[in-house]
Image (cartoon, rainbow, N blue to C red):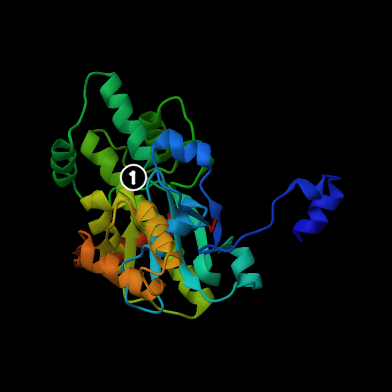
Amino acid sequence: MGHRIIKELDLPYHLLPPLVEAGNRVGTIKESLAKELNLPEMDVVAVGEHDTASAVAAIPTREESFAFLSCGTWSLLGTELSSPCITEEAFRENFTNEAGVYGTTRFLKNIMGLWIVQRCMEEWSQHDEPLTYEEMGEAIDSTKPFVSFINPDEDRFLSPSSMIEEVRAYCVETEQYIPKTKGEILRCILESLSFKYRFTMERMEAITGRTNRCLYLVGGGSKNQWLCQFTANAINRPVVAGPTEATALGNIVVQLIAGKHVSDLKTAREMIANSVSIKTYDANYLSGLERSYERFVSHLSITAN
């Protein structure tokens, strides 16, 4: 397919370097660079050369089949497969197959992440109303659950002039309660994200025919305890949060495997699970959650974006 596209675009194919599998040695560091950085001669190893590929390599699991959520500004929810899943249903639901390390496939979908929260926090700071992490939690905890929702994947939330007003405008247009306080706005966003994760996870499991025991949540989002707890409640399964720096760890373990310091990816993941801070959030029963989820899906006309 790549050859065909390049030919159709009349591009000089010979300028493109060969594809290299993750874990392969591709050469040594340049002598001039080694001298500048005061480094010894060392191998250069191809790693999972997309940040999500490296993050998934660092999932702290001992399970053969698992679901992951790499969450920061954006979210990627998926599972690791031995080969691509190319079906009509996967196409309709807009899932992608991306190359992982050691011949694996990351079957996943892109979802909004904490971008909406980040923009709201920036606006409050600009108006001299900044929130600390503790104040953010107090604000959320002081509000009622499942009052208002947004579809976080709508284009309107990519770059509005005011994210706060865009959240409120969505609620006005969908005839919901309009969140007024910081806590109400934050809870609206985080609960909406957690429900969108459930929505996507259910479709992923239906397509692959695999049900997962829990959801491994890595990246910056793993530090947001409310997002983690809301997601555990929404999927009614544990959320295993951490490591935060999964991309860096995934990069490192592939290099360790290449150097024969670690035997394989399974061993590397066990090593990470035993070495980093991980917190498990168990699902809490909340009255009205299922009705609210149904309302989230039907009232807001959520589709598989």
Would you call the spot at circle 1 few (<14 residues within 10 Å), some (14-19), or many (20 or more)? many
Q: Residue at x 23, y 34 (%)?
A: 182
Q: Is residue 284 above or below residue 164?
A: below
Please state the horizontal and vertical placement of residue 229, each as a whole percent of the image. Answer: 23, 58
How many marks on residues?
Answer: 1
Could you tell me if residue 241 is visible in this image? yes
Q: Quadrant of the C terminus?
A: bottom right
Q: Residue at x 38, y 36 (%)?
A: 167
Please state the horizontal and vertical placement of residue 56, each as a whole percent of the image. Answer: 42, 62
Q: Which residue is mark 1?
A: 189
Q: Residue at x 51, y 41 (%)?
A: 31
Please state the horizontal and vertical placement of residue 259, each as a whole percent of the image. Answer: 42, 65
Q: Is residue 249 above or below residue 74?
A: below
| Left or right placement of residue 197 versus residue 146 in this view | right
Quadrant of residue 260 within the rendered picture: bottom left
Q: Quadrant of the N terminus?
A: bottom right
Q: Is residue 99 above or below residue 124?
A: below
Q: Is residue 220 above or below residue 197?
A: above
Amino acid marked by disc 1: Ile
Q: Residue at x 24, y 49 (%)?
A: 223
